[in-house]
């Protein structure tokens, strides 16, 4: 469908909730009336620009699903789209600055094509700062908090009053207040997802790896973190809804599924107790008192999803992952489930943030380094060889050289496969604003570089232990030619990829491919593009700090 200028589809600029009056646009979802659509009554083509974490990627799939169900088409690029949806991240200033930096381009595009509209959503839209949004993002026509995203098509007037009940309920729901501050409310997202799934309005972006949100929001109070203020308090999706969605993903043939939440380890604490979960009484009450008896937890979910089997009795979804885990809530039950379930991949992302107890206290992380390392030892015992990745913040308020050194020591002791490190970035409205951001920028940068150099050596040594071993790789993609703005890690990966002696092993018709092992190791290989989506056995012949390279020795096309 070619999209005509959608001038009639949008209402004027607005920053307030539910302020855009739906225009008289017939819903395009009804096949009965579709053939009567007048010629030229076009719906906008759209482009979604997604920043941030997997949760945002999953949310974007829901928004794309809404727009497609309303009859819109995807535009080939942001520059050619009638409707640009920006799904923002606010975790660091840099993430917001990226979007602010594009305001000029968006304004120019809008001058060239006056029908173009821009919607901004995601963690950058916080209720407490709604008033300043238009000043920071002047090219934007409409702002939606993350919990308002299910209303996207409705607010744009792309669905009519016959819109599904869930959408209309969402439009009228109130904002939640946490510690006296208005924030996004996560409580309507679970029912909205259920409706979206039932109506086929989740446009998954990959046919290989599926996202499955299990808990929205975050109840933790890490002092540096904006997420609880942008995403609201924790809300777990009902157990049966999640298992039903996993069944659908299995039926669709996905080889990989990742359960999502800011803290997946606390899944279920807010759900009603049920007799069938009477055997569950985990030790998650540590930290704050929670009555957990009889409530489902992540371990129960892993068992249930692992229990979805194919005709030959194998897990119907061979690779099951979950992210992100909080060390404080990581229960023995979860560790046992990870060890027991065939499909659960041998990788855990367990953010440590700092290797110093005094720093962890200032960060409000609730655990000590001893607690963290005890949990890790237990996991390593239960799942031998498991790969561990983590997040680290350097230069947080008052970080002394000794505290920083303690983090380096933790890295040396623990020996992570991958570390995602960043310099502390003060975020508006977070408790840390009451502390002094007193580590100078150049010290933050120096520490960051020092930490990355330490980790590079550890990563390389660990990756070298995979040399001459055969690993199963789920091929995810044909590797694109080097992109502009590649990160350092990507450049290093590509350097491995383009080493002539290795690359020369490729046969006729082979292309550069990339995939991951069960341990979440990135592996470059060459082969037939038809291998994408399949598991192949690869003999590893080169190891870099960020990736491995090898050649296909057997294709296990499943
Ligand atoms: N829920 C996860 C956890 O418990 O660690 C992490 C979610 S957070 C969106 C992802 C990572 O961003 C964090 O682990 C932290 O390392 C980093 N981060 C969060 N706030 C930050 C800030 N103000 N400055 C720098 N990094 C930050
Ligand atoms: Fe942020 Fe802490 Fe929640 Fe993670 S656990 S999202 S770092 S508040
Ligand atoms: Fe960013 Fe929000 Fe995710 S702040 S990291 S998009 S939860």
Image (tube, grey):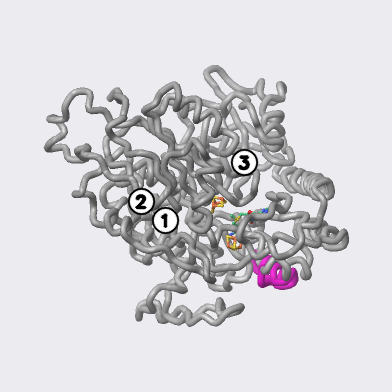
Dot 2, how many residues are within 10 Å of its Cα: few (below 14), some (14-19), or many (20+)? many
The residue closer to the viewer here, 431 or 391, is 431
Question: Mark 1 = which residue?
Answer: 147
Hey, which residue is sitting farthest top in the picture?
508
Q: Is residue 493 above or below residue 397?
A: above
Dot 3, how many residues are within 10 Å of its Cα: few (below 14), some (14-19), or many (20+)? few
Quadrant of the rendered image containing residue 254: top left
Residue 111 shown left or right of residue 171 in the figure = right
Q: Which mark is residue 391?
A: none
- Give the image location of residue 528, x and y in percent: 50, 26
Question: Mark 3 = which residue?
Answer: 97
Residue 178: tell me if it is visible: yes
- Give the image location of residue 197, x and y in percent: 31, 51
Residue 100 shown left or right of residue 270 in the figure = right
Q: CA distance from mark 2 to mark 3?
A: 25 Å
Q: Is residue 411 magenta?
A: no
Q: CA distance from mark 1 to mark 3?
A: 22 Å
Q: Are marks 1 and 2 in contact (CB under 8 Å)?
A: yes
Magenta region, residue range? 365-379
Question: Mark 2 = which residue?
Answer: 150
Q: Secondary structure at mark 3?
A: helix
Q: Nearer the viewer, mark 2 or mark 3?
A: 3
Q: Is residue 67 above or below residue 270?
A: above
Q: Are marks 1 and 3 in contact (CB under 8 Å)?
A: no
Residue 514 shown left or right of residue 127 in the figure = right
Q: CA distance from mark 1 to mark 2?
A: 7 Å
The residue closer to the viewer here, 315 or 206, is 206
- Give the image location of residue 311, x and y in percent: 33, 52
């Amino acid at each position: 469908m070619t999209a005509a200028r959608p001038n009639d589809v949008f209402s004027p600029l607005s920053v307030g909730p539910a302020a855009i009056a739906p225009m008289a646009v017939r819903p395009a979802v009804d096949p009965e009336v579709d053939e009567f659509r007048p010629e030229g009554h076009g719906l906008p083509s759209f482009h979604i620009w997604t920043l941030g974490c997997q949760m945002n990627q999953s949310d974007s799939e829901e928004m794309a699903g809404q727009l497609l169900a309303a009859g819109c088409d995807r535009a080939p690029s942001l520059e050619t789209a009638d409707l640009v949806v920006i799904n923002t991240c606010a975790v660091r200033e840099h993430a917001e600055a990226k979007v602010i930096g594009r305001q000029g381009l968006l304004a120019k595009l809008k001058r060239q094509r006056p029908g173009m509209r821009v919607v901004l959503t995601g963690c950058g839209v916080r209720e407490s700062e709604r008033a300043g949004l238009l000043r920071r993002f002047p090219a934007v026509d409409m702002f939606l908090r993350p919990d308002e995203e299910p209303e996207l098509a409705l607010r744009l007037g792309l669905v009519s009053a016959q819109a599904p009940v869930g959408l209309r309920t969402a439009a009228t729901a109130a904002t939640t207040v946490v510690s006296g501050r208005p924030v996004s409310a996560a409580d309507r997202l679970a029912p909205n997802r259920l409706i979206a799934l039932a109506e086929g309005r989740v446009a998954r972006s990959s046919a290989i790896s599926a996202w499955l949100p299990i808990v929205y929001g975050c109840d933790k109070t890490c002092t540096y973190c904006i997420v609880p203020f942008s995403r609201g308090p924790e809300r777990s999706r009902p157990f049966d809804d999640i298992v039903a969605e996993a069944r659908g993903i299995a039926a669709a043939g996905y080889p990989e599924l990742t359960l999502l939440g800011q803290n997946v380890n606390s899944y279920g604490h807010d759900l009603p107790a049920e007799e069938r979960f009477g055997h569950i009484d985990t030790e998650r009450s540590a930290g704050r008192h929670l009555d957990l008896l009889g409530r489902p937890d992540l371990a129960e979910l892993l068992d249930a999803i692992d229990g979805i089997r194919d005709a030959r009795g194998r897990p119907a979804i061979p690779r099951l992952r979950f992210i992100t885990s909080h060390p404080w809530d990581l229960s023995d039950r979860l560790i046992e489930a990870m060890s027991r379930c065939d499909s659960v991949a041998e990788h855990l992302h367990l953010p440590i943030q700092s290797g110093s107890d005094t720093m962890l206290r200032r960060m409000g992380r609730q655990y000590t380094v001893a607690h963290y390392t005890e949990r890790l030892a237990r996991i390593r015992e239960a799942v031998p060889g498991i790969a561990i990745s983590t997040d680290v913040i350097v230069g947080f308020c008052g970080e002394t050289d000794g505290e920083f050194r303690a983090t380096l020591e933790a890295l040396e002791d623990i020996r992570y496969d991958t570390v995602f490190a960043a310099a502390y970035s003060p975020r508006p409205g977070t408790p840390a604003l009451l502390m002094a951001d007193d580590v100078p920028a150049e010290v933050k940068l120096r520490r960051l570089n020092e930490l990355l150099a330490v980790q590079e050596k550890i990563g390389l040594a660990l990756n070298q232990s995979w040399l001459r071993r055969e690993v199963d790789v789920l091929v995810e993609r044909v590797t694109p030619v080097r992109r502009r703005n590649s990160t350092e890690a990507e450049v290093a990966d590509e350097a491995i990829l383009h080493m002539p002696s290795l690359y020369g092993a490729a046969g006729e018709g082979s292309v550069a491919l990339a995939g991951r092992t069960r341990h979440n190791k990135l592996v470059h290989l060459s082969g037939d593009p038809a291998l994408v989506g399949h598991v192949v056995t690869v003999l590893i012949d080169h190891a870099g700090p960020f990736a491995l390279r090898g050649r296909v020795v057997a294709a296990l096309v499943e």
